[in-house]
Image: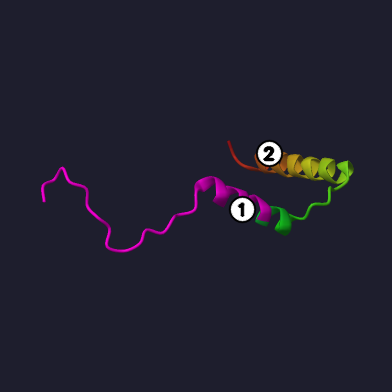
Amino acid sequence: MTSAQPVVATIPLVREPRASVLAAFQLVEDARYLGTERRPRHVRTRRIAERTIVSRRLARDLPV
């Protein structure tokens, strides 16, 4: 056998799942874990405001 000849597999090749299939599966699992119901807008707005306040307090309290 020369290096130009293909090597014949002695074991059957198993098809690996593609990345797109794995990504789709991950999206489904995330949706199940996080839930599909939407939260009211005021809850999201409040969380953003709370994060802003915390980050400003942290910036104020840290020495320059």
Which residue extends farthest top? 64
Which residue extends farthest bottom? 11
Q: CA distance from mark 2 to mark 1?
A: 40 Å
Name the mark nearer the viewer: 2 or 1.
1
Q: What x and y, as percent, mark residue 60?
A: 68, 39
Classify 10 Å Cα crowding around label 2: few (below 14), some (14-19), many (20 and above). Answer: few
Given residues 60 and 23, the one toward you in this image is 23
Question: What amino acid type should be assigned to the residue bearing mark 1?
Answer: Gln
Q: What x and y, as percent, mark residue 5?
A: 17, 46
- Reply yes or no: does residue 14 show up in magenta: yes
For residue 27, side relative to residue 2 (left or right) = right
Which of the 4 image quadrants contains residue 52? top right
Segment tinted magenta in the rendering: 1-28
Identify the element where label 2 is drawn: helix
Q: What x and y, as percent, mark residue 61?
A: 67, 43
Work out whether 11 lies above or below 22: below
Between discs 2 and 1, the one toward the N terminus: 1
Dot label at residue 26: 1
**What is the chief secondary structure element of the magenta stretch?**
loop
Q: Residue at x 22, y 48 (%)?
A: 6
Given residues 33 and 7, the one toward you in this image is 7
Q: Residue at x 55, y 51 (%)?
A: 22
Work out whether 56 lies above or below 23: above
Which of the 4 image quadrants contains residue 59? top right
Q: Residue at x 37, y 58 (%)?
A: 13
The residue under label 2 is 60
